[in-house]
């Protein structure tokens, strides 16, 4: 563990353009892109570029406290993260086109909450490596953290490298060295908020997950969603090589192709066409 003072010496690098919010042009349909816990908009930038190349407007939000020193992240709550998502959604809704929400990991949970809360105002939902359930050891760490005194909100767990299979992608991936315990507890609270609401989601939904995800087990997450999503149109795509951060990993091109095809189907109020293969 590291305390508050050591984080100041070993924290994340200063923010740069790659880790800030972005907006790429398009028309007829919009995509709201949401990164995960301790992630940054960098994780969604390649996907945003591919969407924009297909003439789909793409807006990637920076969740409150993210891409900043870890003490700033530790001071935020899941309600703050959700507020960032709502602000991004209102920005896109003002453009007058259908809006599809696309979230990675914890961002997928925030996207699901938005879809449930906003109803028909959200046209469709994409969940990339959703974190409704975590690897058993991670879940145990969170439960143990919950039993510690409240002063542990100033304590950070040292993180290892990002859960990315591709060596080149992992070597350039911006990531923080520490995870605030407070953020882990907020993630658990968000899971408890979102899981019971999954049945409320009736929009067409696409779920993409990897068999080799070391953070969020594929079976627990995909099986739960396929059984409980209220969507009449829902589809799961399973990857074979990537780890957890599938938007930048070995199969990012396939992920982007699936998402582009799904989102493009909502142009002018349409519905997603079946994916090839």
Image (cartoon, helix red, strand yellow):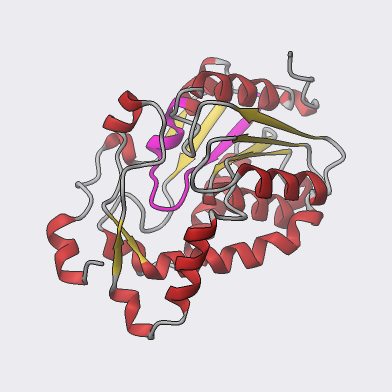
Q: Quick check: 62 left or right of 188?
A: left
Q: In the image, residue 65 lies at what x, y percent?
A: 36, 58
Q: Quick check: 40 left or right of 70?
A: right
Q: In the image, residue 69 lies at what x, y percent?
A: 25, 57
> Does 12 sit above or below residue 50?
below
* Whether residue 26 is visible: no
Residue found at x 21% / y 70%: 4
> Does 253 sit above or below residue 151?
above
Quarter where residue 174 is shown = top left
Q: Quick check: 167 left or right of 269?
A: left
Query: Which residue extends farthest left?
Result: 9
Quarter where residue 148 is shown = bottom left
* Whether residue 61 is visible: yes
Q: In the image, residue 199 lies at what x, y percent?
A: 81, 55
- The answer to if 131 sits in the magenta stretch is no
- The answer to if 38 sits in the magenta stretch is yes
How many discs appear?
0
Of residues 34 and 142, the one nearer the viewer is 142
Residue found at x 29% / y 75%: 154
Q: In the image, residue 20 lies at what x, y percent?
A: 34, 41
Of residues 241 and 62, the one nearer the viewer is 241
Query: Which residue extends farthest bottom?
Result: 149
For the magenta stretch, what is the residue range?
28-46
Quarter where residue 271 is shown = top right
Of residues 170 and 66, the one nearer the viewer is 170
**Quarter holding the N terminus?**
bottom left
> Does 33 sit above or below residue 12?
above
């Amino acid at each position: 563990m590291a305390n508050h003072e050591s984080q100041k010496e070993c924290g994340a690098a200063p923010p740069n353009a790659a880790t800030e919010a972005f907006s790429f042009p398009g028309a007829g349909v919009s995509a709201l892109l949401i990164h995960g816990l301790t992630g940054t908009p960098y994780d969604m930038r390649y996907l945003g570029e591919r969407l924009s190349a297909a003439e789909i407007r793409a807006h990637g939000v920076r969740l409150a406290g993210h891409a900043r020193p870890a003490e700033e992240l530790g001071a935020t709550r899941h309600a703050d993260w959700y507020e960032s998502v709502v602000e991004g959604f209102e920005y896109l809704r003002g453009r007058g086109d259908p809006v599809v929400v696309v979230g990675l990991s914890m961002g997928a949970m925030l996207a699901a909450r938005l879809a449930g809360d906003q109803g028909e105002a959200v046209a469709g939902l994409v969940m990339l490596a959703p974190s409704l359930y975590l690897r058993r050891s991670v879940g145990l760490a969170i439960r143990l953290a919950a039993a510690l005194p409240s002063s542990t909100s100033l304590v950070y767990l040292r993180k290892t490298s990002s859960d990315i299979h591709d060596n080149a992608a992992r070597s350039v991936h911006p990531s923080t060295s520490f995870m605030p315990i407070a953020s882990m507890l907020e993630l658990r609270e968000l899971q408890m908020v979102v899981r019971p609401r999954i049945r409320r989601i009736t929009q067409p939904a696409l779920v993409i997950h990897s068999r080799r995800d070391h953070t969020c087990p594929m079976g627990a997450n995909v099986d739960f969603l396929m059984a409980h999503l209220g969507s009449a149109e829902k589809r799961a795509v399973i990857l074979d090589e990537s780890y957890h951060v599938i938007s930048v990993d070995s199969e990012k091109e396939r992920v982007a192709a699936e998402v582009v095809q799904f989102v493009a189907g909502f142009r002018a109020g349409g519905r997603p066409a079946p994916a090839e293969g």
